[in-house]
Image (cartoon, grey):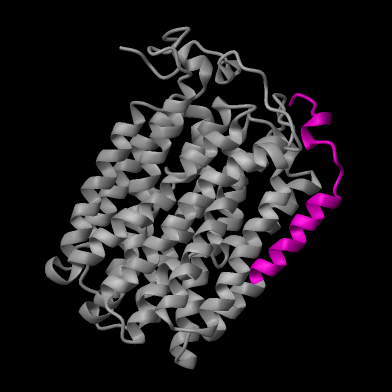
Amino acid sequence: MQTEGTAATTTSAAGRYYGWVVAWTAFAVLTVAYGVQYCFGVFLPFIQEDLDVSRTRATLAFAVYVFVYSALSAASGWLTDRKGPRFVLVLGAGFLGVGYLLASRAQNATQLTLVLGFVAGVGMSAAFVPCNATVVRWFLHRRGRALSISTSGSSFASIVIPFAMGAVVDRFGWRTLYVVGAGLAAATLLIGSRLIYRDPAAKGLVVEGELGGRPAPTGAGSTPRTTSLDLRQASRTIDFWLIVGLFLFTWLVVFIPLVHLSPYVKDAGASSTVGAWLVSLIGVGGLGGRLLSGSVSDRLGRLPTLTATLLMQIVSFVVFSATTSIAVLLPAAALFGMGYGGSTVLFPALAGDRFGPGHAGAIVGAVFAGAGSLGAFGPYVAAWIHDTTGAYTWAFLVAALANALSVLFVVGLWLSARRPAVASVATA
């Protein structure tokens, strides 16, 4: 039996580069893992009623969950570098499945917070960073396109799974559906662990095989490097901290629409199905944004593309704050998804370009842990603003301001030294 680090073959079975199998497997893992996660917004009114708690208190469970899996992404990224993605995905499958299963049995908000936040949260840390850091290692010139495929799983997730759950939650209840989610998540991560290999060398391949004999793309995109900085070296560069600040203000508010748009329209008299449609449209837009932004950024550059995605999010939040009209919210939700999805693709690509692929798990994990963990507080603060003011208006406006601040960090990256940070790397 082959192990992950054993060279298996010099060519893929169908004559195609195996990196694309890795990218599509990552897509499947993120589809299911994030799909079950996004169901929380659809379940939220039912959880509130069942546990007899305020929206703020119920949302705390989700906040802890996001904080835990984001913070632990530093560890899961490090483990991916050391042990490989297979080990991390198997571990994540166990925690994620057990966490959701226990969440379905929670009898009060404290129990829900403990099992969803701390158990499922540990499992979810095996998803975004390990999968996408591995994709970074498999690609050089087509890194953006490959990451468009892998990261689009989390957008496709919000199209399919929350909508399906929203259509039947009145009939089966949130508890039964979390049991279903537990089985789906655990099974998908386990299957994915058998298909995702650490890097091309683990399959007896070389990264240049991604081009299939075609010339490397040219254009205004970022120039990737094969030399690498480790996390310690990267953290000494201004680019590292600009990237942290950029994604801190982006991810601080990114989950607000995914959690609160459904309750927002339900408060205005819409049905659960309409709320699920809004979440699904975020996914539709996100899928388009992810599929487009990677390839576009390979040609035009990461920073111009990133600026466009942030402007989309700002416009969407302003629209959310101004109306409860479903006819207006539907396209705004799709626009938000396009911006959110596009910016998410560019995060690991930007880090890989600036610091090299060798320590992508640790670097991407550290940024995700530092900046992404604060995303846990966005939905919680939005719920507090709603419970305090009786509306979501100020929550959405504050979110727009946060995205505007993230644009300033993009400007900082524009003004930083033009040469990639890895150009002066000294081997540690």
Q: Nearer the viewer, residue 247 or 276?
A: 276
Give me the residue at 59% from left, 73% from top: 399
- x and y percent of residue 76 in the render? 48, 41
Q: Is residue 112 above or below residue 136?
A: below
Q: In the image, is 426 to the left or to the right of 83?
A: right
Is residue 105 visible in the rendered structure shown here?
Answer: no
Q: Nearer the viewer, residue 31 or 312?
A: 312
Q: Is residue 426 magenta?
A: yes
Q: Quadrant of the C terminus?
A: top right
The span picked out in magenta is: 402-428
- x and y percent of residue 186 in the render? 27, 43
Q: List the single residue furthest toward the top.
A: 10
Quarter assignment of residue 42: bottom left
Q: In the image, is 414 to the left or to the right of 114?
A: right
Principal secondary structure, stretch drawn in magenta? helix
Q: Is residue 76 magenta?
A: no
Give me the residue at 46% from left, 14% from top: 203
Q: Nearer the viewer, residue 116 or 12?
A: 12
Q: List the single residue furthest toward the front.
A: 327
Is residue 106 visible in the rendered structure shown here?
Answer: yes
Q: List the single residue furthest toward the bottom.
A: 389
Give me the residue at 51% from left, 44% from top: 291
